[in-house]
Amino acid sequence: MQQRIGVFVCHCGSNIAATVDVKKVVEMLALEPGVVHAEDYQYMCSEVGQAKIAEAIKEKQLTGVVVCSCSPRMHETTFRKCAERAGLNPYMVEIANIREQVSWIHKDMEEATQKAVILGRAAIAKVSLNTPLKAGESRVTKRALVIGGGIAGIQTALDIADAGYEVDIVEKTPSIGGRMSQLDKTFPTLDCSACILTPKMVEASANEKITLYTYSEVEKVSGFVGDFTVDIRKKARSVDMSKCTGCGVCQEKCPNKKAPSEFNRGLNTRSAIYTPFAQAIPNVPVIDREHCTKFLTGKCGVCSKVCQAGAIDYEQQDEIITEKYGAIVVATGFDIIKLDNYGEYAYDQSPDVITSLELERIMNAAGPTKGHLERMSDHKAPKNMVFIQCVGSRCSDGRGKSYCSKICCMYTAKHAMLIRDKYPDVNVTVFYIDVRTPGKNFDEFYRRAVEDYHVNYIKGQVGKVTPEADGSLTVHGVDLIDNKQIKMKADMVVLAAAIEPNPDIRKIATMLTASIDTNNFLTEAHAKLRPVESPTAGIFLSGVTQGPKDIPETVSQAGAAAVKAIGLLAKDKLLTNPCTAQADIMACNGCSTCANVCPYGAISYEDKEVRGPGIREVRRVAVVNSALCQGCGACTVACPSGAMDLQGFSNRQIIAEVDAICR
Amino acid sequence: MQELINKAKELLANGTVVRVLGWRAGDLSYNPEPAFFETEEDLQKFVYDGFCGANLSKYMIEASKLDGKTLVFLKPCDTYSFNQLIKEHRVDREKAYIVGVGCRGKLDIDKIKEQGIKGIESVEGTELDGPDTLTIKTLYGDKTCSYASAMLGRCHVCKGKEHMIADEIIGESKDTKDAERFDAVKAVEAMSPEERFNFFQKELRKCIRCNACRNVCPACSCRKCVFDSNKFDSAQKANVDSFEEKMFHVIRAFHVAGRCTDCGECSRVCPQGIQLHLFNRKFIKDINEYYGEFQAGADIEARGPLTNYTFDDVEPSIVKERG
Amino acid sequence: MYKIAKENLSALFQKIAGDKELYLPVKNGGQTNYAAWDETVEVDIDTLKTVKSAKDAFFPQFETLYNVKREGKKLDLQQEALKDKDFVIFGMKACDIQGVKVLDNVFLSEPVDTYYAARRAHGIIVAMACHEPEESCFCKVFGLDAADPSAADVATWMVDGELYWKALTEKGEALTASVKDLLTDADEAKVEAEKAQIRAIVEKLPYSNLSLEGWGGDATDVKFKSPVWETLYKGCLACGTCTFVCPTCQCYDIKDYTTKDGIQRYRCWDSCMYSDFTLMAGGNNRTSQLQRYRQRFMHKLVYYPANNNGMYACVGCGRCVEKCPSSLNIVKVIKAFENEGGSKA
Amino acid sequence: MSIGANEEFRPKIVAFCCNWCSYAGADLAGSSRLAYPADVKIIRVPCSCRVNPMFILRAFERGADGVILCGCHPGDCHYSTGNFYARRRMTMLFSMLDYIGVENGRTRVEWVSAAEGAKFSATMNDFVAKVTSLGKNVRLGDLRCKN
Amino acid sequence: MTKAEMQAEKIKEISGTDPYKCMKCGKCSASCPSFDEMDIKPHQFVSYVLNEDIEALANSKSLWKCLSCFACVERCPRDVKPGKIIDGARQLVVREKGGDYLKADEIPELLDEELPQQLLVSAFRRYRR
């Protein structure tokens, strides 16, 4: 059907009319095919101007409107709403930008007028091919899921719950608390980690809006923003959570105490039935079936016998819980890298070469040494300690990570200071490449270590650490300031190992179709302007899952992620952008090329029955989820057969504009 | 060849496959055709010799829609195409029983005719384990030529004798590479823009838009080609203006860029002898130079270069900078 | 009968081209095709078969029918002028000329195709005998004589470096008269020897004894329903090579090209091998490649003879034999039915 | 309407601009009154990755003398990754056009942010000058569009 | 290009390393067994190349003190490989001095099967004079 198009040329006072012969533009555009109405006015965006458009739409039964005026970024919405009020689909309006692109930059009236006509023709050509579009609506499930129960996840959940929404935390380990629960003290204030974390954990568990799924993992995610369906696997705890009182007798009586303690980084062992640490939440133990005598041999059952509450259940099975969510926050945190590639530091050869996280456990009163600083080999107090920075960070040789882990400089200063404070006779040396302390009170903190505690900071790296026969360690380093090699004895060496995203994140990102970078950190929707959102709508990022962070940064980002999630949950319905991609299943090859370039995971494949002249078969075709599609058009070009097209910016529309411009 | 027939018979007999995709002997000694065989009797006409150049991968798109498994014979270079088709979900691996066949380079009858040999009655010595010299009986007397001189252009830049995918391999293959793959592209690149323009203008002017290059191409497997549809107002059936030849061949090359395995079928089938591989190989060369070595079809898991990126990719201005 | 030395041919061509357009086999990029003559082209009359047939001279691959121009909201229709100038097409073989006869039956019967008729009226065919027939040739099967292209305006033979020239029609006589000062008288003995030699070779060609028994206008039912097609078509890639090199394929499509200020309506060859051949709003009447493949050969060997007094729409030029990417061709079709056993089931 | 009696060659330039950065950059050039030749006509697309090589060839077919594509700076794409794909696609396409003998000065990609009005204007001035120096595009057009 | 620039380029080419990647951590010097005998220390090799002061490098003691043990190459976190740089400098000197290599047929005599190949190659460069 031929469109009935109305053209409205705006003078914009003298902004346009001074350089463009507006009357001439009207006259020329009136000759274009399909144009049944053309007029000009002082200010099209004014009430009177809009009334003119509305009136023409009604009187001339316009099916398309072209406004030649300022940039569409200025008034496209205005004119679309105007059209909608007059009964025309708002997406049947196109703007020819004859102010920013014509009158404001050209001086010659003839030339400017001619260009205005051409831009008007392009808009007419485009609008001739426009089709009415309707923004879709999708429902929002008012419940959020937080993946990961560390400080990031806890903070996000607390903030979301505080706004009145239900929120579930899925935590893989038996207790929430995460990495922070393993720390002894926190920089730069040196307050005790447990003292500030435990209240948050208790708060999370007590909050009636928050449901904790500990010892659980996300198994499957489907759906899209506002309407995710998630399967959560609750692993068999072998302890009935409703019956257990947390008395701890089972752990005491368990005869098998040979399992390495994850919480203490393998520095000591725990019982087969265990809670990771004393303040664990929930305070309900789990049976580690790989180490439990009952599960291994069938004989034992001591815990069951001693449990007064009868909570032990050897028969318990994994359970799948399916729940719907409107928003998902990823807070899966980090671990430190494996040091297999760094043989030179003798981490595998000597128990006295440890990571900083192990040192945290050693320094902690609840740790394997009850807080006494001692060597793990002979339990003697060390006299000389060496800290090595950037172990695996800032490495572009493929052995480690190319990025800076950000937290090591500060925690090493903390460790050095705490040791010098408690054990003033221990010499502490730190080998560093750079000391990076950008943060409130951070540099002051580092300087205290040097100035008040006389920690020996040496600019230079350690080449290797050699364990000696006498049990000591020789550190071969360099002092780049003095330009001399250093060979020193140490009793303990502490490695500031790089941090890396939790290895599970790959699997999780795939399930969420959230994009991930080469270092396995989740990608933000915009590095600067949307730092806590994933490009995949409805997925938010909290904590180190997005990039290295310390605790205060993590907490602020957790709050920001919560606010973004709340903003989404507060809506009843989501209006979806109608300018989305559409697949023509007749032409679709089902080759997956489009899905490979979609940044939003909006394209999936279904076996659909395709019917056409002479064709009736079931075949794999692309399906665009318009709630997820943001309308970038990457898929439309990736598709060789042109089966994928973008509504509002269709191939034929753009070609029509090209033709009109080149005419 | 008998070994291949025996294998086909065996697999048909034991029900592993319900049909065999191979080559049927032609009525001249150089024109075997791709064909399906369903019975032992059919297989009497099965042939595998130097003229069996056709890449059978593409036929597996249709065969994958049929019930039951198809035994398909693939030469080493064909297996790249098959892999690429698996990657694009166009063939079903489960529906194929792949026998990798040996190859010592495939023959091009036009290469023989170019040597002035006419009225060919028979060509002998084309079998896999045949001699290095072909004996050609013609209406105008007997002739000989070396096997290598009669090989398809693509065989001179052979990708190697390894099959990328196969259930089993029968017959020895030979790497027939005796020229550099990108030499022809480099030669064009070395010309001045005017010379390049004239060169391609002359080559493409020969194009009759028969679509043989497209239809034989395993990467050009679109259900509906843009040049047959009106999605871009681009349907063309003839090259009315020289622009349309360029449009067709540039866009075709672009659509298969990063997917083209360089199987050389396009150049083999062009009735006008247009060196179509000059387009595809140009993209392959650019991709290798700009985004790292990439061989389509070598690795099913590898991300295609045009559906991938790195932050530090070269800018399009490289085209100007390299001069 | 006249003759002219091969080395003087360019003078002959120049002379002809002086007042007429001249088309002849020209080598370009290693391929020989008919093209307009000028001093710069590389004439190649030694290659037996041009890639495309000489069909373009009368029925070009594309031709404009008319233009429509738009001015404001007014439309102006401009008919494309018909061919009004004589032209010579030099070097056509017996099979190619027979191809033109096949086209004549289609385009010159009512309603007459004026574009074609104009070209036909102005075209002068100078034929050449086939000096060295090749293994893909089978014109004998259709009763043609490669040695004596008698359906032309002028027939020529290339013998021992001399082109023998014999006018056969009035048009041919006129052309001969216009170039007579370049020709010398000749006797026919050498030509007769050449003819005998050509015919002897033709006898030895592998396809010369191909039997058309069972084909023809009455065979519709039997052939159409034959199960042979079901296996035969499977190697077909659905490209249009066979149709575009064929001297008798005459199907075309009419399309509009949007120009700067209107449209150009043109027609171009179509191919029944293409999935969008005869595509209509309601879909296609042939939806599978089997049907399309069958259509092509049924048309050549059954439907066309049915409507044209038994004349086949194949002339045995063998171009499809040489050019089909899958080595499928009309000979294999004919033979497949031969092998089928009784052709008159 | 015909161009006045001006005989000097004025090129036809099509500029594809992404909605989020470059189109806004062009707006800024406009509001800053930073002039560039009227030969440039802008087509708004959501993202540089929306630009199909078919569009670029189409422009040349219909008589464009130069085509320029502007998008967000790499890493700043509104859709995260769109311009990365556009960059590879255009590198390939431009390389091919250069290869078949089309002057490489007729095609360009430029990254222009919303804040770079001056860059937009300078880019267009430079591109128009370049294309003007190359003259009429005779190697990649359809004669039927030129009547 | 000045001679110094050419030499610096040559070293980069021979060593196949990019000195700009160095982050000045000093791990090379920390690892070097010949550190004390060197006048220019391994971590400084990089800046000599960056500063195009190849003369100094070529005339340094370090050139002949490096054992080519490649500890620095192995441990360098940035793939800058000072050991390769100094090796490159050595080759530059050797190439400039011209000829005087061992004859090919003398080599088998001198071979010890236990010898690592890398050491052999380095030794050729060091001890031919």
Image (tube, rainbow, N blue to C red):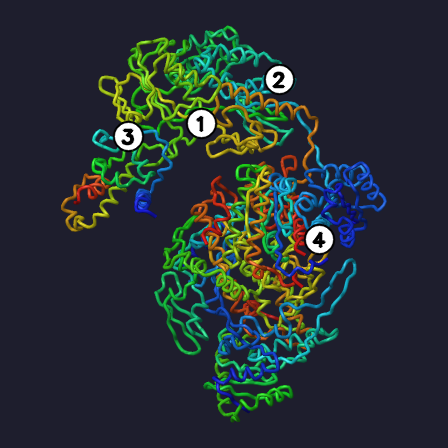
Q: Are marks 1 and 4 in contact (CB under 8 Å)?
A: no
Q: Are marks 4 and 3 in contact (CB under 8 Å)?
A: no
The relative height of residue A159 versus residue B164 in the rendered view (above or below) is: above
Front-lying residue, E81 or A316: E81
Neighbourhood count class around disc 2 (C-alpha, 10 Å): few under 14, some 14–19, many 20 upward: many
Q: Which is more foreground, mark 1 or mark 4?
A: 4
- The residue beneath circle 1 is A500
Q: CA distance from mark 1 to mark 2?
A: 29 Å
Q: Are marks 2 and 4 in contact (CB under 8 Å)?
A: no
- The residue beneath circle 4 is A110
Find residue C107 and report its horizontal and vertical position in percent: 69, 74
Neighbourhood count class around disc 4 (C-alpha, 10 Å): few under 14, some 14–19, many 20 upward: some
**Upstream in sequence: badge 2 or badge 4:** 4
**Residue depicted at 30% across the width and 9% down the height:** A425
Q: CA distance from mark 2 to mark 4?
A: 64 Å
- The residue beneath circle 2 is A161
Q: CA distance from mark 1 to mark 4?
A: 63 Å
Q: CA distance from mark 4 to mark 3?
A: 72 Å
Front-lying residue, C87 or D145: D145
- The residue beneath circle 3 is E29
The relative height of residue A406 versus residue B72 in the rendered view (above or below) is: above
Chain bearing tag 2 is A
Given the image, on which type of amino acid does mark 3 rest?
Answer: Ser
